[in-house]
Image (cartoon, rainbow, N blue to C red):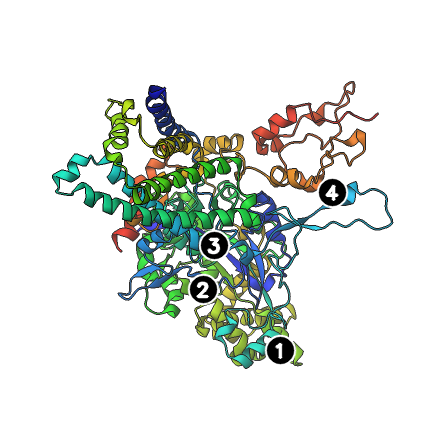
């Protein structure tokens, strides 16, 4: 047994309202730069639907993930190492920008600089890649809320596996949202595809990262990832991917997507697993055995033998305690209500999902039944094979058993809690019928429904031992070069589209003002009026401690430059 | 003039080539990339790029045979001048044509696909001009001089001159009287070598052959350079090799 720790996430799909706040805040934090305009480390897709990039789940086409070769050994679906190298000059399985969508902005400057005229000036859409006029034909969530719909019907690769009449019925009846980030897999096929060895899994927390200095732009990882969550920055020529917001989790705070999630549906915690068992679990012959096999890789953090092995492996007490308090472990192992996304890709994904019960409840309610009565709900879950089968395609390689069991537990929780809320007598048989005790059901309810920040995110801080290093991180950034990840959208796009007040469109006395839409968060120059020279209050030009700590050195330099500062208007 | 052209210029170019790579490797790891444009356009690239690259690999192999291997060695092996000439011209023409066709497709793509054209920097343009000229003059030598024009034995002049640069016995006088097309080809290639480390051509030196032998999944500590990672070292190093060792 070789114990390793992994930061994992669980998302409760019942609570996702599809507001895209996670996507937007992630975009603002990580991919608001030139070269990654089309990139969403976090995206929310409507299921059924094509997803982003379109039909990424069709691995016969995109060749992502692992498969078993003739001898039953795990090998990349896109081919052997030699085959990958021979295809290095032109990757036959690489999606192009068109498969994601052509990113665009609008020529807002035309609105500002237009002379007086009889007609209203328009802001034409401009391609962010060529700068030319473009026709907007697709976006990152173009089929949002359509749930199939007449023009999308049959384009969901998962529905293609279900029979025709079931397909149509499904698309008329059900719709839910699926937020996706990088899975930070235990057996990452992106890392295995990387010819340069630039993609690595961090030993301390299992986060999968791209070393920007070692990446040589061979773009095999984009193909290797079956979730299509590694992206190619066409400006820098390097691969980029979700970082699990490592600068944040290292100091014990959740990822941006989790922090800003309106529905509070994300949970982050530590899982201990046996690194020696991963390969065997990922190589089980039948796809439907992959979910139980992955469960078997996780270690019980309450087991003294596991704790002893973890300590021997150098895992700190703080991490072990975090693993014992992990909300993710409870949802995945204790209650078994969370399921992995596409285990059949054999990457051992580590972002799991609580399947949505709401579509079932809605159907029940719409037929005039009591949607929260235990008997009705259990019956519906068993009878409604359509949503269950679709969810099984998503979470258990088509095995409806675990999906049904998870939905039944959620249904039992609803029924049990409703009796409590209505002051009725509880019925222990409801809980027992799904293999839980009433106390467990209530604990699960607290975790899923009312858990506070500290209970949803149990993230051990990595800071203690190397605070000095984190300090250095905050005051220097090697990625801050032209086109690098440290470069912001402002640098990259402003020169092309002039979305600032410094292009002559603003009144003269406000020419140095910053347009908040593109403020890059680095410099405060232009954000505030210049200081009053004879005023007694100097507090305004002293950033407070928090700002200073998070401030970028270049930003600080820039703030010190008086060149762009506007003259105060008096 | 002979000394400047065939001794000073080569040494300046080769120095720039070597030191430039060292400097860039040390100071610009982030910029060291293929800068692939396949994301913008895949169809033409899948046609042209393999032709160009594999063709060029064959061309480079041919150059190694023709320049690095002295004529006396091949004769010692019993290969007559005529046999050598036959092989070099036929293989050279074939691989040259594949390279040229691939390059033509890639250049056509670079000009006609707006996104790819937009992604082309001035640096790229200079590099393309030199690269195209180098390949064009090279084809002129192979096809023009050796296939059609009766043949020129560069192994008596150009090859020893080039080898002399590396044995620190430069013999610039050997290049006097060689055909102009050979002289131009040499100078253009030297210019290309001089600029090489400052262009995207550096990706040649990151050919990922290590991929064939390394473990599938790479594990790395948060900051392997820090000594405080040592306390993890013994426990964590083994899993890093586990997936490969057990494969």
The span from disc 2 to disc 1 (Cα, nearest Å) is 38 Å
Q: Which residue is mark 4?
A: A109
Using residue A207 as the reference point, say whether residue A141 is left or right of it.
Answer: right
Label placed on residue A364: 1
What residue is rendered at 19% in x and 36% in y?
B71
**Could you tell me residue A448's position as x and y percent?**
56, 60
* Precedes in sequence: disc 1 or disc 4: 4
In front: mark 2 or mark 3? 3
Of A358 and B8, the residue lying toward us: B8
Do marks 1 and 4 both belong to one polypeptide chain?
A: yes
- Label pair 4/2, CB-CB below 8 angstroms: no
Q: Chain of mark 3?
A: B
Q: Which residue is mark 3?
A: B44
Label placed on residue A61: 2
Using residue B85 as the reference point, say whether residue A316 is left or right of it.
Answer: right
The span from disc 2 to disc 3 (Cα, nearest Å) is 19 Å
What residue is rendered at 43% in x and 43% in y?
B34
Q: Secondary structure at mark 4?
A: helix
Do marks 4 and 3 both belong to one polypeptide chain?
A: no
Of A376 and A292, the residue lying toward us: A292
Q: Secondary structure at mark 1?
A: helix
Of B187 and B192, the residue lying toward us: B187
The span from disc 4 to disc 3 (Cα, nearest Å) is 35 Å
Q: Secondary structure at mark 3?
A: helix
**Which quarter of the rendering shows the C terminus of chain A?**
top right
Residue sitting at the far right: A118
Q: How many marks?
A: 4
The residue carrying pointer 4 sits among few (fewer than 14), some (14 to 19) or many (20 or more) residues within 10 Å by Cα, namely some
The span from disc 1 to disc 3 (Cα, nearest Å) is 53 Å
Q: Secondary structure at mark 2?
A: helix
The residue carrying pointer 1 sits among few (fewer than 14), some (14 to 19) or many (20 or more) residues within 10 Å by Cα, namely many
Do marks 1 and 3 both belong to one polypeptide chain?
A: no
């Amino acid at each position: 047994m070789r114990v390793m720790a992994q930061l994992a996430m669980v998302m409760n799909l019942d609570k996702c309202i599809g507001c895209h706040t996670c996507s937007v805040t992630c975009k603002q934090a990580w991919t608001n730069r030139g070269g990654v305009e089309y990139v969403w480390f976090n995206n929310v897709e409507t299921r059924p639907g094509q997803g982003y990039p379109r039909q990424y789940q069709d691995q016969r086409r995109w060749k992502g993930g692992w498969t078993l070769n003739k001898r039953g050994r795990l090998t990349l679906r896109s081919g052997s190492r030699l085959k990958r190298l021979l295809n290095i000059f032109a990757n036959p399985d690489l999606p192009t920008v068109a498969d994601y969508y052509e990113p665009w902005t609008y020529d807002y400057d035309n609105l500002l600089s237009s002379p007086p005229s009889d007609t209203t000036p328009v802001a034409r859409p401009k391609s962010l890649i060529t700068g030319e006029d473009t026709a907007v034909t697709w976006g990152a969530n173009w089929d949002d809320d359509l749930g199939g719909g007449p023009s999308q019907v049959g384009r969901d690769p998962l529905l293609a596996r279900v029979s025709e009449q079931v397909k149509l019925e499904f698309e008329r009846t059900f719709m839910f949202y699926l937020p996706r980030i990088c899975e930070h897999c235990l057996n990452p096929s992106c890392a295995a595809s990387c010819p340069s060895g630039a993609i690595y899994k961090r030993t301390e927390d299992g986060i999968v990262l791209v070393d920007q200095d070692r990446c040589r732009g061979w773009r095999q990882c984009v193909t290797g990832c079956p979730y299509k969550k590694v992206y190619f920055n066409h400006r820098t020529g390097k691969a980029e991917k979700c970082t699990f917001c490592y600068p944040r989790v290292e100091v014990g705070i959740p990822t941006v997507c989790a922090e800003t999630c309106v529905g509070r549906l994300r949970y982050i915690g530590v899982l201990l697993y046996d690194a020696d068992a991963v390969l065997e679990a990922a190589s089980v012959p039948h796809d439907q055995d992959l979910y139980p096999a992955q469960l078997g890789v996780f270690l019980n953090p309450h087991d003294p033998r596991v704790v002893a092995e973890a300590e021997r492996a150098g895992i700190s007490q703080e991490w072990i305690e975090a693993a014992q308090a992990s909300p993710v472990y409870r949802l995945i192992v204790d209650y078994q209500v969370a399921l992995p996304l596409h285990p059949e890709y054999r990457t051992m994904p580590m972002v799991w999902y609580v399947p949505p019960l709401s579509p079932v409840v809605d159907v029940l309610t719409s037929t005039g039944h009591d949607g929260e009565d235990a008997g009705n709900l259990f019956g519906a879950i068993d009878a409604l094979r359509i949503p269950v089968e679709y969810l099984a395609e998503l979470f258990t390689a088509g095995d409806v058993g675990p999906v049904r069991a998870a939905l039944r537990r959620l249904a039992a929780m609803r029924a049990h809690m409703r009796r409590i809320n209505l002051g009725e007598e509880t019925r222990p048989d409801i809980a027992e019928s799904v293999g839980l005790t009433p106390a467990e059901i209530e604990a699960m309810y607290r975790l899923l429904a009312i858990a506070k920040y500290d209970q949803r995110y149990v993230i051990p801080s990595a800071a203690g031992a190397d605070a000095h290093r984190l300090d250095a991180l905050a005051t220097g950034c090697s990625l801050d070069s032209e086109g690098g990840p440290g470069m912001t959208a402002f640098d990259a796009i402003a020169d092309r589209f002039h979305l600032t007040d410094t292009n002559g469109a603003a009144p003269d006395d406000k020419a140095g003002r910053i347009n908040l839409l593109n403020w890059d968060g680095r410099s405060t120059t232009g954000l505030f009026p210049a200081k009053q020279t004879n005023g007694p209050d100097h507090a305004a030009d002293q950033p407070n401690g928090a700002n200073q700590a998070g401030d970028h050195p270049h930003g600080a330099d820039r703030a010190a430059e008086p060149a762009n500062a506007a003259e105060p208007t008096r | 003039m002979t000394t400047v052209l065939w001794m000073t210029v080569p040494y300046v170019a080769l120095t720039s080539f070597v030191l430039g790579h060292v400097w860039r490797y040390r100071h610009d790891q982030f910029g060291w990339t293929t800068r692939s444009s396949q994301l913008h356009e895949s169809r033409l690239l899948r046609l042209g790029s393999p032709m160009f690259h594999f063709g060029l690999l064959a061309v480079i192999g041919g150059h190694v045979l023709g320049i690095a291997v002295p004529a006396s060695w091949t004769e010692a092996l019993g290969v007559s001048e005529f046999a050598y000439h036959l092989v070099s011209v036929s293989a050279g023409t074939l691989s040259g044509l594949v390279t040229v066709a691939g390059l033509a497709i890639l250049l056509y793509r670079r000009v006609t696909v707006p996104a790819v054209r937009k992604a082309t920097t001035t640096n790229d343009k200079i590099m393309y001009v030199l690269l195209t000229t180098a390949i064009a003059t090279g084809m002129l030598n192979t096809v023009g001089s050796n296939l059609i024009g009766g043949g020129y034995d560069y192994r008596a002049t150009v090859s020893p001159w080039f080898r002399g640069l590396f044995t620190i016995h430069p013999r610039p006088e050997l290049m006097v009287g060689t055909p102009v097309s050979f002289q131009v080809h040499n100078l253009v290639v030297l210019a290309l070598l001089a600029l090489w480390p400052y262009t995207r051509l550096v990706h040649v030196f990151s050919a990922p052959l290590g991929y064939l032998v390394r473990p599938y999944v790479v594990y790395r500590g948060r900051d392997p350079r820090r000594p405080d990672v040592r306390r993890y070292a013994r426990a964590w190093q083994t899993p890093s090799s586990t997936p490969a060792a057990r494969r």
